Amino acid sequence: MTNSDVDIVNVIESKFGSRVQIQPGLLGTATIHTSNGLHRDVIKAMIEADEKTGITAITGLDLGANLGLIYHIHTAKGFFGIKAEVPKENPKIQTINDIIPGATFHELEVTDLFGVVFEGNPLAGHFLLSENWPEGIFPLRKDVNPSEVKLNPSPPQEKMHEDKKTVKFIIGPQHPALLEPEKFSVTVDGEIVTKVEPRIGYVHRGIEKSAESRTYIQDIYLVERVCGICNPCHAYGFVGAVEKILKPDVPPRAKYLRVIALELNRLHSHMLTLGHAGLEIGYETLFQYFWRDREPIMDLIELTSGNRVYGSLMTIGGVRRDLKDTDIPKIKTVMANLRSKLPFYRKVYTDEPSIRARMQNEGVLSREDAIKLGVVGPVARGSGYDIDVRKDEPSEAYGEIPFKEIVYDSGDTWARMNVRMDELEQSINIIEYALDHLPKGPFRVEVPRYVPAGEAVNRVEAPRGELFYYVKGNGTASPERVKIRTPTYANIPAFLKTAIGENIADVPPNFVSLDPCFSCTDR
Amino acid sequence: MAVDFWLIARILIFPGFTFILLLTLFCDWVERKLEARIQNRVGPLVAGPAGLFQPIADFIKLLTKEEIDPRDARKTIFKFAPLAAFTIMVFAMYFLPVDGSSVISAGGFNGDLIVILTFSTIASFLLFLSGWASSNPYGTISSARVLTQFLGFDIPLFIIALTPAFIAGSLSIFAIASYQTTKALPFIIMAPWAFVLFLITIQAELEKDPFDVPDAESELVGGIETEYTGAKLAFLHLTRDVQIVFGAALVVELFLGGPYGPVIGGLPAFWYSLWFVLKLLAVVIVTEYITTLFARLRIDQVLSANWKIILPLAVVSLMLTVAMITWVYPLV
Amino acid sequence: MTEKKTKKPRTNPLSPMWKRTASSLFKKPATTKYPFVKPKLPDDFRGKPDYTIRTCNMIDLSGTQRQFEFDVQKLVNTHCTVCARDCPANAIEIVEVDGKQRPQFDLNKCIFCNQCVESCPRNAIKGSTEYELATTDKKSLIIKPNPNGDAKQ
């Protein structure tokens, strides 16, 4: 399989010739404009050229008379956009669900929010919107003002017991196993799971629509609040995309400070998950120990950015505050302390018999399924699928800092937790290297408030996986479209597959091992 | 019939109802504080000195809350099962000698070991019924797990509980407890294998980690207590706590010599009660320590642990003890 | 139902948790006993914004809300509503105090991002480390500008 992205452009050119227009350098490696349903053939050609092809997102756009669609496809080393358009009166297009199974969720979302019908992937009911949203009104179109929409009364509840043999066991919306509300209807036969049906959208706040009516500076804080745990990654995703349109000269010190903020966030998020996994299997002591050791990291985040959770450190053109020289020894002390505690936790995860009994060989996801469903982050790296945005497309200072990409092959719950455990050490290495090599100079440049017309994508490796942002500017002080594809959104289809055939008791640890964050999923 | 005030005082106050209630609440505090300290946090702190009144504050708070009954629940069982389970557990405690003689009688009767083990089984069964009557899928699945677990572990429990009976030559708790101090060493030294197995089995009967599976919060929300509110929930919690005290008291009576210990100066009743409480607290601390140490096993792992490991080992331990009594110990 | 055996530990049968849990019993708890003990905060913790009226730039609010570049020199002599315009939570409202237009901070809506601190070209708004703002009266959380001196709540 070829690894070079230039080859893929050549392949497409040679196969399709003048039926498509290729714009290199736009939206990643290249953008391919298609029409007449050619998108399916282009994607098929890409999969044949490179087996690690998968879909990242499908962006819907309101272009006036037409609805635009951008299929963002990632390959081994390249990132492509495939554009297509459908008229508003007849918004039908063929699905790519059969070629790439991971596209299901993305297509359902575009159907729900824009009204595009994907033939072959029908939507029954609502996907992201609530049940009492009226039919025929698609909120992300430009002519819809959500505050003027009248909601229908709520429909009746679904029944718990379908037939006498199988029981529908509903996890959520409110459930101790979940951090945020979502509903998973699990059909069980005795104690074995036979089917899982998700219903997401309980935390849908309409952030993408809201971002279109606020200025760029206000939007940084808005997208930060998509998720509390990975908020610097959201802020950086947005800021990075806007910077690709504006092209300011971001100073090197700002790049290093951004890396430090992102890695501190990764540390605290992984410790949160590792402790939370202990809670799911009933191991409260491990949970309390992990979270006790997580507290110094929260104090560090407070020291560097002013608040324990919402750092608000990123801004367009750099970072908002500088790192004082007196703070650097404090950070290094905490890092050294944490590094000395890691061997104990490593040993617990390896030697503790009850952890191995609950986590090994449960929830296995094979490498092929991982590639086809498009999973990202530690879930992918635990199944032998080595994608990491920090290595594939290094931005900021990641290209200059040496670190290892952690990949495990077994694909079970235990492997995914081990990936996170090892990444803790890598993050500590990155932070110490960045502190030692912190360049001097300014930490911010001024940027204009009006962003010229243009579009850009940005990908960042959040603790849960690859986070994707698409920003389109139109020359005013507000963006025209902001599209967010969060890592949990890509990982939930994997859970639907791995949960089948195991005990009910294994469903929570399996679920936690993919580190779900529903605020991210629903936006 | 003449009213025996002394008997009523023993039933109601000491070593009867009030004493058991206070001991239960105190053991709850000990457990929570110990678990907190192991996990490097403070535990109950504010209610009373060092948080001593926290369990009673929780109990009173639950009594004042509104009671909501689900529409489809079986009314009678739903309402009375928690109270009935609590009553039976307390009544089972009345048979144990606390200050040299139990509440019911001065010397017990032959076979009361079997009686109290049966009472504990009936109480667990009533707990299962309370979850079953809730008409809630979480309660149903959890009560099925409760039934499977306690019925399965009752068999090795009975077999291992018979081991001290074999050594003492009697099925009366008094005889077993006093045999350990008057005629021989405490059975923890004479049959340590039975003691270890008994601890594990009690851990499973009391549904504590690693056998915590019926009460799995992360899967089943509340387990059998999902639909319970107010006073009924208070009594469910109290039943669980009394079960823990009962299990620890069984360990004390059967293996640690019961309340009998050295008496310094006069007043044997006081010293016996003191030794009883101290030994009970030691057992509670050990079981709580094991709880914090392990994660929760799955139901099929618990069952395979029971039928494939614990039950055969229980039978082997009984045979080993009988062999030791017949051939080895008379030589010592 | 598939039978899964409990896995035997591969290396050391004694989990490392035994030692750690036993030794934790004798260590001081890691809990900060708030509210009896208050935590120590860094100096630049983002708490309540602190507004000094004397240096505010607002002289007159004309009907036009012009957008302009973030350049301090240019703003000295022009109309300024930057704090209200940049607030992500729309927590700053321009009200009239003593014939002058001043910003009013609604702490019910404030997200303590300190963007107003950054945007103000005259450094009229400073951050503070005050975070214990809970109260039973919503109206007391609106900081009204006081014509005589500093902002009063």
Image (tube, coloured by chain):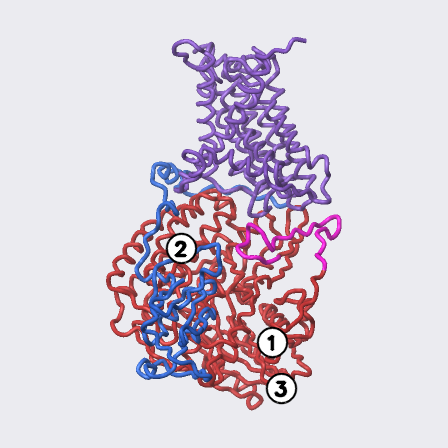
Chain colours: A red, B purple, C blue
User: Residue flagged by tag 1: what amino acid is it?
Assistant: Asn
Above or below for A163 versus A483: above
> Would you say the residues marked 2 and 1 are in contact, meaning their CB atoms lie under 8 Å apart?
no
Residue A175 shown in magenta: yes
Residue position marked by numbered label 2 in the rendering: C132
The circle on residue A65 is 3
Q: Looking at the image, can residue A115 be seen?
A: yes
Magenta highlight range: A156-183
Front of the two marks 2 and 1: 2
Q: Residue furthest bottom?
A: A18
The circle on residue A145 is 1
Q: Are marks 1 and 3 on the same chain?
A: yes
SS type, badge 2: loop
Tell me which residue sits at (56%, 61%) in the image.
A494
User: Residue flagged by tag 2: what amino acid is it?
Assistant: Glu
The image quadrant of residue C24 is top left
User: Residue flagged by tag 3: what amino acid is it?
Assistant: Ala
Tell me which residue sits at (47%, 62%) in the image.
C108
SS type, badge 1: loop
